[in-house]
Image (cartoon, helix red, strand yellow):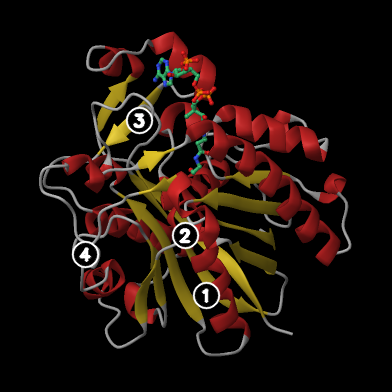
Amino acid sequence: MSYARIIGTGGYLPEHIVTNFDIEQKVDTSAEWIFERTGIEQRHIAAPDETAADLAEHAARRALDAAGIDGDTLDLIVVATTTPDHVFPSVATQIQARLGAYGCPAFDVQAVCTGFVYALGIADKFVRTGSARRALVVGSETFSRILDWTDRTTCILFGDGAGAVVLEASEEPGILSSHLHADGRYKELLWVPAGVSSGYDQTCLNQAYVAMRGSEVFKMAVRTLGRIVDETLSANQMTAEAIDWLVPHQANERILVATARQLNLPMSRVISTVRYHANTSAASVPLALDVGVRDGRIQPGQTVLLEAFGGGFTWGSVLLTY
Ligand code: UT7
């Protein structure tokens, strides 16, 4: 039986940092309120000329370096993003060109904050079935571009960044299972009303920005993440004690704490980056994974559970041996 194993991780955050104190100068909020209700202290924001493909390229190069391989040995590239540079071509094809991986399939996946988990689940299936031997999976977002910076209910929550992993076919266990779900009935709880096909009213520009019913999303996220963790453990006939590290989507520290509590997992076994990164949507899980790997907490052979919840709604998990 062949597995897809992670052989390298990488992350990239834009240089410019916006703190809660910066935000309290712009909207009717306070640095304390933001930190208390979300656990967020700061977020990184892409420069005006910095795009999702630029962030993705940095993260991908770091993952390739960590894996010790060249881009031209890749035979699949999947990028999760909600904020691509262009309507088309995809971010994946742009970074393919920059990495010199010409010819292999390259495409984007859109599942908002669950995007990286979806992309990893898809790439795992390519590798397991023998359609790809080496795959690059990236989550990259410039979410700051779809925020209404006058709306205190959303602009405090998000940041920009990218994270990446390189997968390789291996006889040693790697990704053990992936679990992907969606329920489109909840579209209007978290969405950007405007779109290429639906268009938007030019007199109402805020249709082009994220709109969210925060507390409803919060409750749904906590309930759903509890269920996806149970589903993942039971599919692998495991209990929560077997999890060395939980690497959750970083939306709100209170959601991370609630999920860990449901699992009876101490916060010392949860990788939390929300304080410094805020919610980077599809980039949040691979960025947190990269932080845990690079600071030495996540060690080879350990069991790691990735999970995410986002607009759509979409949600999912990946259980793996690192
Ligand atoms: O990544 C996808 C998933 N996204 C999420 O999971 C986000 C989930 N939601 C959340 O994280 C939280 O719901 C928020 C952080 C967005 C909001 O926290 P909350 O504790 O759910 O607050 P709330 O929306 O229930 O609002 C409570 C009060 C309201 O005032 P009133 O009506 O009680 O007078 C809001 O108007 O807090 C007010 N409020 C604020 N006050 C100061 C909302 N935003 C702010 C703000 N600063 N930035």
Query: N-terminal of the two: label 3 or label 2?
Result: 3
Residue beneath disc 3: 43
Residue 167 visible, this angle: yes
For the point 82% across and 66% down, the residue is 235
**Helix, strand or loop under label 2:** helix
- Location of mark 2 (residue): 115
Q: Does residue 297 appear in this view?
A: no
- Which amino acid, by three-letter code, is at mark 2? Gly
For label 3, count other residues whose C-alpha is less than 10 Å away and answer few (under 14), some (14-19) or many (20+).
many
Eye-nearest disc, 1 or 4: 4
Mark 2, residues whose alpha carbon is within 10 Å: few (<14), some, or many (≥20)? many
- Residue type at the position of mark 4: Val
Q: How many marks?
A: 4
Mark 1–mark 4 distance (CA, rounded to whole Å): 28 Å
Marks 4 and 3 close (CB-CB < 8 Å): no
Sequence-earlier tag: 1 or 2 = 2
Q: Three-letter amino acid code at disc 1?
A: Ala
Residue 148 is left or right of residue 135, and the answer is left
Q: Residue at x 68, y 83 (%)?
A: 2
Mark in front: 3 vs 2: 2
Q: Mark 1 and mark 2: span between their CA atoms? A: 12 Å
Which mark identifies residue 123? 1
Quarter where residue 102 is shown: bottom left
Distance (Cα) linking label 1 and label 3:
29 Å
